[in-house]
Amino acid sequence: MELVTIGALARASRLSPKALRLYDSLGLLTPAHVDEVSGYRFYRADQLERARLVAWLRRLGMPLTRIGVVLDLAADAPEQAAEQIAAYWAETEAELASRRALAAHLIGYLSGEETAMPAPAPALAIRYASRSDIGRHRDRNQDTAYAGGRLLAVADGTGSGGDQASAAVSDALKPLETALPAGNLLNAMAEAVRQAGSTVRDLAAGDPWTATTLTAMLWSGSQLALVHVGDTRAYLLRRRELFQITHDHSVVQALLDEGKISPEEADSHPQRSLLLQAIDGGRGAEPDVSLHDAQAGDRYLLCSDGLTSVVPAALIEDTLSAVGDPELAVGRLIDLANQAGGPDNIACVVADVIEGRDG
């Protein structure tokens, strides 16, 4: 195996050795070998492309946590990696437009063309609604949907204790709503998921099939921290365009990522309900976490596969764009799932980022 030194990789990728050491510590670019005596790092020649991708994303200004998400997707799901970049750039352009307007106001004020200082940027808040529905073919509802002043969550339980498991993981996050952590939001949410895992393991003692997915977001006032395990999903609607911002932990998604099946085949694949990761009685789940900057006008959808398995993404996008009130939007999405047969429980949360303090 051909190895190159950290200096050679730095020159080829235009990243400094200091940056490469940082990315190693964050797990973004791990050396192939570290000399035990000198601590000197060596990399495989084929890691140059990954290093260059990191450098390009940093030039875009993308935060390191989001770069990690893109890197994880780039090898096996490049289209979804591209969607992540598109979503980030849409956020960046909106922020740039806001800053451009503020700069114009300041230039006008300081040059004497305007007589009043520009008003400060308005505070942001969220307006939200949530609902879960039994569907048309289940004898009980194992989906949980929750929306509060800071926390949004959906969970899809399975097994005899699935309803308790989905409720337990949602409840485990609720303390963060009243005591927002002063440190890292993502670490706090991941830790809450790990704690929820112990509760689910107790439930699974009587039924090893007891498990749950989780997709949740925690509002900090300007950002939303996202934690995700399983095949429940989160979407962002920005300027009437819908972006999926989570990646399913499922067998079918893995087959799609590897190019072994087409999206059309995925829709009817016999293993489409099998998960590669869930919060269950086995080893601890490793949730995906990411941080998202909020913009006024954004709309977020969190939902279970009871919606996405039967309602096309284009129809979800049209509905979220057309129905203004979150409560009505949630109701309409659930109606669409039931009209499509309602084969499973359905959970939906819709949250709008708005100016001011409403909700």
Image (tube, rainbow, N blue to C red):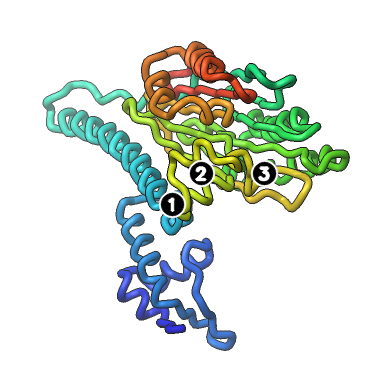
- Counting from the top left corner in percent of width and height, residue 343 is at 61, 23
What residue does disc 1 label?
77
Q: In what element is the residue under mark 1?
A: loop
Looking at the image, which residue is at 71% across and 46% down?
194
Amino acid found under the numbered disc labelled 3 = Ala
Q: Badge 3 local density, few (<14 within 10 Å), some, or many (20+)?
A: many
Give the residue number, with chain letter if any, for mark 2: 247
Is 289 on the left-hand or right-hand side of 176?
left
The local secondary structure at tag 2 comes to loop
Q: Position of residue 261 (x, y in %)?
A: 47, 48
Residue 189, placed above or below residue 123: below
Residue 21, placed above or below residue 167: below
Please tell me which residue is depicted at 65% across the width and 32% down the height of the picture: 155
**Residue topped by disc 3:** 278
Determine whether 242 is above or below 270 in the image.
above
Residue at left 46%, top 32%?
235
Residue type, mark 1 in image: Ala
* Amino acid at dot 2: His
**Residue 153 figure quarter:** top right
